Image (cartoon, rainbow, N blue to C red):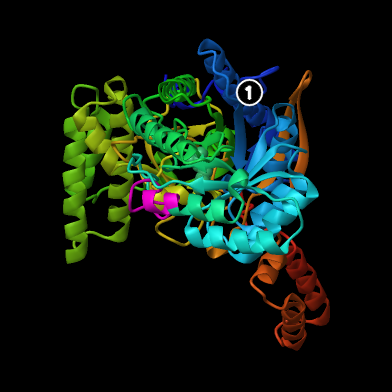
Amino acid sequence: MNNYGIDIWANDSFIIKNGKVCVDYGKKPAILDIVKELRNDGYKGPLLLRFPHLIQKQIEKIYGNFAKAKKECSYKGSFNAVYPLKVNQYPGFVKQLVKLGKDYNYGLEAGSKAELLIAMAYNNENAPITVNGFKDKELINIGFIAREMGHNITLTIEGLNELEAIIDIAKQRFKPKPNIGIRVRLHSIGSGIWAKSGGINSKFGLTSTELIEAIELLKENKLLDYFTMIHFHIGSQISEIQPIKKALNEAANIYTELKKMGANNLKAINLGGGLAVEYSQFKNKNRRNYNLNEYANDVVFILKNIAEQKKVLEPDIFIESGRFVAANHAVLVAPVLELFSQEYAEDKLSLKDKNNPKLIDEMYDLYKSIKPSNALEYLHDSMDYMENILTLFDLGYVDLQDRSNAEILLHLVAKKAIVLLGDKQYSADLSAIQDEVQERYLVNFSVFQSMPDFWGLSQNFPIVPIHKLNEEPTRSASIWDITCDSDGEISYSKNNPLFLHDVDIEKEEYFLGFFLLGAYQEVLSMKHNLFTHPTEATIKINDKGYEIKNIIEAQSILDVLDDLDYDIHGIKDILNERISNSKLVNENQKKQILGELYLFLNDNAYLKNTGV
Ligand SMILES: *Cc1c(COP(=O)(O)O)cnc(C)c1O
């Protein structure tokens, strides 16, 4: 039975039980039950479910693995982590994360003024804050204010001009000062589609020459004591461990050199993020080649060795992994609205009593006599017949009814062929057919809104029907979203084949789960066609099963228009006026129309017409 690679990507967070995808925790509730409950309460359309226990799980894993690695190596430096806000700044996630991270002293990383202000408001007391990215004087000022408020904050400079700004501001402000970190520019680079942040040509970091100059500047301005951390970040979703080890080695050597130059309070190395998530649904495809345990062991081991060799204290370790912490907490569940070949059912066939074109009669025979031994041949034959019918249609020899019959028969033959050849599912021939006769599933969501990295970077996310998993899916599937954009499609590909069930949406509901969407996807999202962030809910797993909390409905159409700076009162007035001026309806009808329009304006834009 197709298990959609759940043993590969699901990280023991989800399992299949009785044909349903269930949360692998507590009483193991089925995602379908949670979704049905929300839908019964009136929340239709796509639903984004957040599972706080999965945030907790990742935090525990990170601290647990590093504690173990440190113990095994008797490593004396401390381990610290901060969560980079850019990965997901939604309050439904951040507030949970801060609460769950309290006992670990888990901190926050900010890359902009807005993120820093979130960190200053929500970070746990004494938990570290690091600030990376390009900074102006204003941002640096806010960093000083954070320190003055009592936050344990480190401003990481990305260039000498930022250091000069810090020096200026330090002279103007009060006594407390933030710690200073320096991002180092490494030769080492990462691998994978996001690995652009390392290397000598990267956007960030100080070169060796600039590092020497920075130390001089800090000394001259009596700020060297505040220099406590060096930082690097070689990219996101680093799929191989080797570049991480290489980069750490390089950074650790820079660390010891800087200590030699008198940076006595330098005591921490910050490895940035990059810990990869396993997104693949298939064995041997685009897999990461390491796990957290290996990562933690390697980091501790490398630093221990270099500290020993160079006779420096073992540095404190900081990491800023975001994707690894956030990705698995959020699941989007979206209803299938339509299967496009459903109009090709047998009962739609309308054969003529006597004068069917010969080709149609022959196609009908193929359909009736197809069996495993001839399935492939018959399928190819009916594809040829279809071609011929289309030519005859263009020449005016067959009519629209014949053409419709041929289309239906081709689909019927293809469907049967796929079922008949089922257990040889991955044969080359069959995969060629599946390419040709995919079913198109129209799904009530927007790729642009909910999986922008699929659109922009061809990053695949696990897609799984959340029920019917004790039936073999037989249709090679392409997914269409509800935007009017032909890029809003996840097309069937041989490299990443998706099979879904042959369902009749008029008779039964069918829901797809899109997994691992918690990192980057929410805030990178686009409001293409004005489809907004879907309705979200937080699902707390408890002794009884689960509890649904913090439901936030998708924005109403009026709010979306307001965001675009439309004058929404103006819009209402115009609609009002146009209705009252209409000569096509009477006064009572006008009242009704107005009422209807107001309901639509106050509702979200997703489709509501799911069959049952
Ligand atoms: C983006 C970023 C991170 C987070 O990277 P992940 O791959 O999500 O772990 C950490 N640190 C810095 C400086 C970043 O820019």
Q: What is the x, y in percent for residue 332?
A: 58, 40
Task: Inspect the magenta stretch and tell me whether residue 203 lies in it.
Answer: yes
Span shown in magenta: 197-212
Q: Is mark 1 within 8 Å of ligand 1?
A: no
Question: What secondary structure is the stretch in magenta mostly built from?
Answer: loop
| Category of crowding for the residue at label 1, using alpha-carbon neighbours closer than 10 angstroms: few (below 14), some (14–19), many (at least 20) | some
Residue drawn at (67%, 75%), measured in percent from left and top?
Answer: 565
Residue drawn at (65%, 53%), measured in percent from left and top?
Answer: 115
Q: What is the x, y in percent for residue 111?
A: 58, 53
Taking the image as shown, residue 323 lies to the left or right of residue 397, namely: right
In front: 121, or 90? 121
Q: Is residue 365 visible?
A: no
In front: 17, or 228? 228
Residue under circle 1? 60
Residue drawn at (36%, 25%), measured in percent from left and top?
Answer: 289
| Amino acid type, mark 1 | Glu
Task: Inspect the magenta stretch and tell me whether residue 449 lies in it.
Answer: no
Residue drawn at (42%, 43%), measured in percent from left and top?
Answer: 235
